[in-house]
């Protein structure tokens, strides 16, 4: 008689239980693992989708109600803050990167929330960060400088879950003795839902406090402020789920887009990882699929709780499969499969989900040093007690398109050494492309479309002056 090997599902459960992962997160991941075993790919072929039209436009929404403070009193705001700034060479939370002077993302967010609370004259809206284990300590320490920011129970955050990386062939958890921490990965921001359910009954506690509405967005999206006009529209529409979308441009071709599923007419979100290879051209056709997800979401909490209970405590979010190496910095290490889900994909879990077309100003993420140069420049301004950063009016919602040579500008230390006097003026810049290592003097003004090329190995210098619609060789 021989002993049979444990099933991958049992190995996954044991590993997650041993790591004290919440039961709701374990259930969600086991469900995803089961669907993977059954052959579900998470792919959304073009033939199954129809383009979306007739989206409600922000400009058509009614002005905020005088009793806006009442709605703010029923609102919770969650900022997704689980990411590290490793892509820019940082070891700490990305939200602690200075974006305007010494102000970080978290400084701007904290001032936004305190300004809202002055309107309600009480500790509302509720404010929470969804941290990861990697970001929690430093983020909470930084926010200690805002003692009035904590909620009435002293809370400021909850921690997202972690899930095991899987063997691509067996779908069992991988083991890596060199660094056991690398056996785990974040589950994507779709983890918001099991985290709300599993963090000491956070969802129920919010509802018990009289919170009806949730606004959630990425901490690095400087445009994702609480807009009373959107809050009023969402409250009066009584929709379960509202996604803010913006019009796609060429720079958005690889981002997730909104579509309508032909089989049931529901709105869906399709990410690039869910697109079959043969459909990538259609995915990136901005004239066909014209709206992208800003990841600014409005959710009615009672409806969310009902949906979670109806599905046994989890939302049936589409699978996203990411194939990587166990050490992402070492491509020769063994391949792994990471199962993730997208927060915005929950739009398909409700019959009455909706979308609203918002100005581009509500989508100002900082993903790279290209974005960082733009938001630090005079193409943006801070308003409302230096709590909100937005594009200046003359740009009509269109940010400058920046392409810096990643060999020299990708990492923050090197980036800042090449802009020792700060960013150039980009107020009238359509696009700036830099090839090679170029150090910018003070008082450089870029207008129109400018390309700067340094083909030498050593660093070149762009002197002070005005440069407009030209290619410059140094």
Image: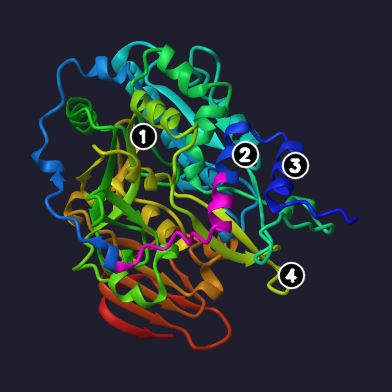
Which disc is residue 26 wearing? 2
Which mark, by number, is residue 333?
Answer: 4
Report the Cα–Cα distance between label 3 and label 1. Answer: 45 Å
Residue marked by disc 3: 14
- Give the residue at the far right of this rendering: 1
Residue 173 at x, y percent in the picture: 72, 54
The Cα atoms of the two marked residues, 1 and 4, are separated by 44 Å
The residue drawn where x is 32% and y is 63% is 252
Question: Along the polypeptide, which appears first: circle 3 or circle 4?
Answer: 3
Q: Which mark is residue 387?
A: 1
The boundaries of the magenta stretch are 31-46
* Residue appearing at x 67%, y 36% in the figure: 21
Which numbered disc, 1 or 4, marks the residue closer to the eye? 4
User: Which callout, 2 or 1, points to the residue nearer the camera?
Assistant: 2
Q: Are marks 2 and 4 in contact (CB under 8 Å)?
A: no
Could you tell me which secondary element the residue under label 1 belongs to?
loop
């Amino acid at each position: 008689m021989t002993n049979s090997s444990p099933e991958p599902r049992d190995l996954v459960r044991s590993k997650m239980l041993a790591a004290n992962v919440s039961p709701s997160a374990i259930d969600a991941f086991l469900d995803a693992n089961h669907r993977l075993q059954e052959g579900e790919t998470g792919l959304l072929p073009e033939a199954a989708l129809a383009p979306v039209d007739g989206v409600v436009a922000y400009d058509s929404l009614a002005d905020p109600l005088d009793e806006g403070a009442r709605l703010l009193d029923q609102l919770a705001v969650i900022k997704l803050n689980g990411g590290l700034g490793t892509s820019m060479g940082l070891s700490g939370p990305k939200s602690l990167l200075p974006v305007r002077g010494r102000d970080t993302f978290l400084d701007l967010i904290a001032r936004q929330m305190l300004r809202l609370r002055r309107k309600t004259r009480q500790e509302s809206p509720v404010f929470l960060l969804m941290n990861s284990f990697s970001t929690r300590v430093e983020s909470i320490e930084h926010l200690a400088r805002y003692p009035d920011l904590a909620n009435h129970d002293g809370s400021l955050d909850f921690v997202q879950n972690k899930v095991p990386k899987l063997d691509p062939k067996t779908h069992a958890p991988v083991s890596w003795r060199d660094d056991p921490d690398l056996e785990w990965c974040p589950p994507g921001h779709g983890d918001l839902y099991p985290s709300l359910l599993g963090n000491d009954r956070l969802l129920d506690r919010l509802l018990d406090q009289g919170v009806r509405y949730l606004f959630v967005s990425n901490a690095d999206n400087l445009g994702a402020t609480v807009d009373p006009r959107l809050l009023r529209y969402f409250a009066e529409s009584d929709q379960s789920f509202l996604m803010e979308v913006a019009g796609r441009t060429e720079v958005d071709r690889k981002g997730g887009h909104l579509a309508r599923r032909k089989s049931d007419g529901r709105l869906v979100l399709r990410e690039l990882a869910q697109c079959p290879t043969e459909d990538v051209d259609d995915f990136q056709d901005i004239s066909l699929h014209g709206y992208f997800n800003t990841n600014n979401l409005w959710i009615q909490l009672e409806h969310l709780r009902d949906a979670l209970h109806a599905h046994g405590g989890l939302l049936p979010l589409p699978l996203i499969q990411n194939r990587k190496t166990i050490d992402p910095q070492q491509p020769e290490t063994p391949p792994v499969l990471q199962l993730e889900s997208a927060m915005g994909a929950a739009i398909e879990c409700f019959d009455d989900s909706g979308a609203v077309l918002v100005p581009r100003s509500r989508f100002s993420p900082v993903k790279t040093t290209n974005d960082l140069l733009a938001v630090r420049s005079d193409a943006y301004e801070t308003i409302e007690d230096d709590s909100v950063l937005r594009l200046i009016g003359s740009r009509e919602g269109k940010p400058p398109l920046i392409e810096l040579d990643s060999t020299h500008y990708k990492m923050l230390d090197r980036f800042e050494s090449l802009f020792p006097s700060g960013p150039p003026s980009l107020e009238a810049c359509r696009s700036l492309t830099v090839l090679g290592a170029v150090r910018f003097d003070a008082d450089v003004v870029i207008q129109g479309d400018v390309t700067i090329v340094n083909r030498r190995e050593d660093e070149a210098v762009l002197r002070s002056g005005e440069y407009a619609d030209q290619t410059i060789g140094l």
